[in-house]
Image (tube, rainbow, N blue to C red):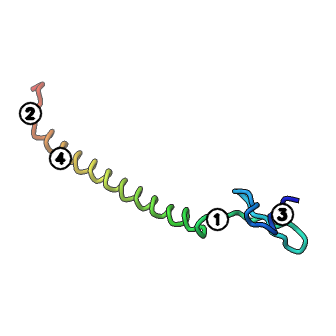
C-alpha cells in the first residue's frame, strides 16, 4: 500500500528509500541528496588533506629529531 502511494506521490517517500513500480513489482532505490555528489566529492578531499597533514607532521618530526641528535652529539657527557 505504501509503495503504491509512494509511486504516485514522491513526497510520500521515506528518507531512506524511494519506491517505484516496475512491471507490477516494487523497486526500491536509495535516495541521493544533491545529485549524489556530496560524499563522492568529500572523500578524496579528506583523504588528500589527511595525506598532506601526515606528511607535514612526519617531516617536522624528522627535521626536529635530526637537529636534536646533532645538538646532543656536541654536548659533553656529564659522566666523564
Residue 34 locus on image (x, y percent): 58, 67
Find the distance from the CA under tag 2 to the CA under tag 1.
67 Å
The tag earlier along the polypeptide, 2 or 1, is: 1
CA–CA distance between discs 2 and 3? 85 Å
Number of numbered discs: 4
CA gap, disc 1 and disc 3: 20 Å
Instruction: Tell me the residue that label 3 is attached to.
Output: 5
- Marks 1, 3: nearer the viewer: 3
Determine the secondary structure under disc 4: helix
- Give the residue at mark 4: 67
Q: Spatial distance from mark 2 to mark 4, Cα to Cα?
A: 16 Å
The quadrant the N terminus occupies is: bottom right
Q: CA distance from mark 3 to mark 4?
A: 71 Å
Left or right of 65, for residue 28: right
Residue found 68% across the figure and 63% down from its top: 31
Which residue occupies the foreground of this view, 76 or 54? 54
Q: Where residue 58 appears, x then y in whole percent?
A: 32, 51
Nearer to the camera, 67 or 47: 47
Residue at 42% x, 62% y is 48
Mark nearer the N terminus (3 vs 4): 3
- Is 74 situated above or below 35? above
Dot 1 corresponds to which residue?
32
Question: Is disc 2 placed on a helix, strand or loop?
Answer: loop
Residue 76 bears which disc, if any? 2
Q: Nearer the viewer, mark 2 or mark 4?
A: 4
- 2 or 4: tag closer to the N-terminus: 4
Image quarter of residue 46: bottom left
Are the two marked residues, 2 and 3, in contact with CB atoms closer than 8 angstroms? no
Decide: few, some or many residues near mark 1? Use Cα within 10 Å; few <14, some 14-19, many ≥20.
few
Amino acid at each position: 500500500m505504501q509503495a503504491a502511494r509512494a509511486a504516485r506521490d514522491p513526497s510520500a517517500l521515506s528518507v531512506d528509500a524511494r519506491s517505484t513500480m516496475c512491471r507490477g513489482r516494487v523497486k526500491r532505490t536509495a535516495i541521493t541528496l544533491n545529485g549524489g555528489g556530496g560524499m563522492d566529492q568529500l572523500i578524496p578531499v579528506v583523504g588528500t588533506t589527511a595525506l598532506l597533514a601526515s606528511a607535514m607532521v612526519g617531516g617536522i618530526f624528522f627535521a626536529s629529531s635530526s637537529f636534536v641528535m646533532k645538538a646532543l652529539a656536541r654536548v659533553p657527557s656529564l659522566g666523564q
